[in-house]
Amino acid sequence: MIELLQGGAYLVNGTEIVEDNGEALQIIKSKTGRTVTKEEAAGSTIAAGILQSHNTSGNMNKLKIKFDKLTSHDITFVGIIQTARASGLTKFPVPYVLTNCHNSLCAVGGTINEDDHMFGLTCAKKYGGVYVPPHQAVIHQFAREMLACGGGMILGSDSHTRYGALGTMAIGEGGPELVKQLLNQTYDINMPGIVGVYLKGAPVKGVGPQDVALAIIGAVFKNGYVKNKVMEFVGPGVASLSTDFRIGIDVMTTETTCLSSIWQTDDEVKSFYEIHGRKEDYKELAPGEVTYYDGMIVVDLGKIRPMIAMPFHPSNTYTIEEVNENLTDILAETEKRALVSLDGAVEFSLRDKVKNGKFYVDQGIIAGCAGGGFENICAAADILKGRFIGSDGFTLSVYPASMPVYMELIKNGCAADILETGAVMKTAFCGPCFGAGDTPANNAFSIRHSTRNFPNREGSKLQNGQISSVALMDARSIAATAANKGVLTPATDFDGEFHKYQYHFDSNIYANRVFDSHGVAEPDVEIQFGPNIKDWPAMGALPDNLVLQVVSEIHDPVTTTDELIPSGETSSYRSNPLGLAEFALSRKDPQYVGRAKEIQKAEKERMAGGHPCQACPQLKEVMEAIKAQYPETNHENTGFGSTIFAVKPGDGSAREQAASCQKVLGGWANIANEYATKRYRSNLINWGMLPFLIAEGELPFKNLDYLFVPGIRKAVEEKEENIKAYAVKENGLCEFTMQLGELTDEERQIILKGCLINYNRV
């Protein structure tokens, strides 16, 4: 089904794989009649060509990327624009689309959500952007329909910013990286590795894009095969897939922890652009005659079967047939893993859902940028036609990804077929994907064609004793399960016909409702602020030395951004930095906020000209222990704040708030064995936080310990590789070593200044 080649590989004429060994280049010469070098072949990837055309550094090893377009949604655009405004923004220098698909419902926080929408509209007018009102489209569907272009690059403040199937390299990052683009700065990275994804064969009937995506995620996530690399989809199997099918695979590449994705394009993709009235934006993309990849994933599409990702991660994958054949063992294993994810905070059981040897689920959702596509919903309608979901506890909700998609489903009758079953059709909304819509009952089990199934992504709250859970599946198997009254069923069991539906894009829907400045700014427009929209608090520069208190210690194998800052209704406070920070780690470590605030008192006192020990008397003994070895240390050259330790933090969302909430609570650093994603580490840096690394093994400190990092400012300035630090113990200072990893010169300056706002402020 999925094969991972060990080491690099060459692709010859787009169809033949030659593994990288001592004879590879000689074999290639015999096949092509030409001599190539590995370096030349590596430059023949689609990704390398696109990166080169957008690189401004002149050095392909050290990229400085300028993106063509930007896109954000209503959890992120307020903070981004507020940061850019504080740094001198006068006009959006490239097309910037502000969609309103995450907090579309104004059910929490009074006027908060609609206030932010009006902020977005007035900013689009003032600075020359595009504003997509609530319920019109989810961020990524609008980008596919209106923004993507062959050979282009788009940066989005959402982790699922992926438009590779349309020939666009897209990257999801934290808000500060978009701020840099708005200020005409660059996205600075080392040249990423490029991994080929070689598709062969064709999917069997009943298998959808989510099945292929989950199979790939299950094969590569745990071993880091594509971490921070670009996945390039090639091979003869690409031609067997419709554009919608390719899009459905592509959007899920985020869950592999890759940096970005790109696909070879063909007449099928050309037709997509023509349907959307943008044929000039199509570009044929293909790897060179001889192309070298840093790794190769071989996917036999014909062997993929309907998949399910069990709670609580998209990589916990099985075939649905496998689950049904081994219910007791697999459900027991899932419950066992849940003990780690949930910290034993609540009772979690799945085996009680087995009745007469069959597994019953409680809810089905087909939604968002992954599930809400036209072909997914049409296929679900074919399965459901003439059936009904029953009048018991099982429910089914379907969210088309955009109003144009919804309109076509109405015109071709698929919407009626779905509604007749007892299912519900809703407007374009990302809520089910991050816990702001369709939260199931306590202990309920939801199957969703969406992007993630982390703990609490469905909206339950451990701190309130609630737990429900999500498994990821394809729309086809969700429909088959719904038609079977909630009994877990693979779509390969469907014995009817899947029809071929022609899609017609109605551009009038956007023309009549979306505000598009066409790049013309209106400086005289006044921004409309709501009472919850607050400026970022003042943040100081990095001091010479640091005293840090460890205020949270997390030993889970991976810590998601949802655990660092919960999504769902908490996101209604996204435009109020201090208000949102109150929710930081609330579902993982409820004591974090209070502890962080306590040590922050010392820094606030210091910044006001007072003595830190007046605000935090417990620091007196800490400073005495430090001065015994470092007598020159005092409150004028030493800063005070908090840090957390997590084994591998940052998997999941690109939301910058996972870092900024720690910063506004006085956080100076994270300490980790490894960072799960580049985007989370970048968020830390852009908010002036030190991304410390410490070797795996027994920690030299424990929760609530104080750490002393002498000469940290000098270490950052002089690019020291090893950072000396001390745990302050009863018997004195216990030395240990940390690293900061590679930092660009700009990143060092951001940390020294205290945050990106300070770096850019004139």
Image (cartoon, helix red, strand yellow):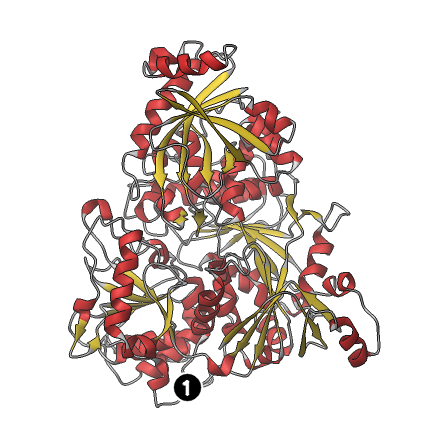
Q: Is residue 419 above or below residue 760?
A: below
- The x, y position of residue 93, in whole percent, is 64, 44
In this rendered view, identify the residue nearer to me: 531 or 2: 2
Residue sitting at the far front = 731
Q: Is residue 325 above or below residue 629?
A: below
- The x, y position of residue 34, in whole percent, is 84, 74
In this rendered view, identify the residue nearer to me: 77 or 159: 159
- The x, y position of residue 628, in whole percent, is 45, 12
- The x, y position of residue 554, in whole percent, is 36, 42
Q: Residue at x 29, y 79 (%)?
A: 489
Q: Is residue 680 above or below residue 18?
A: above
- Secondary structure of the residue carrying numbered label 1: loop
In this rendered view, identify the residue nearer to me: 183 or 599: 599
Is 632 left, or right, of 134 in this rendering? right
Crowding near the residue tagged with mark 1, few <14, some 14–19, many ≥20 C-alpha atoms within 10 Å: some
Where is mark 1, residue-wise?
498
Q: Which residue is drawn at 27% across and 59% down?
A: 336
Residue type marked 1: Phe
Count of numbered tags: 1
| Quadrant assignment, res 319 | bottom left
Is 597 left, or right, of 626 in this rendering? left
Look at the image and tell me whether residue 512 can be seen. no
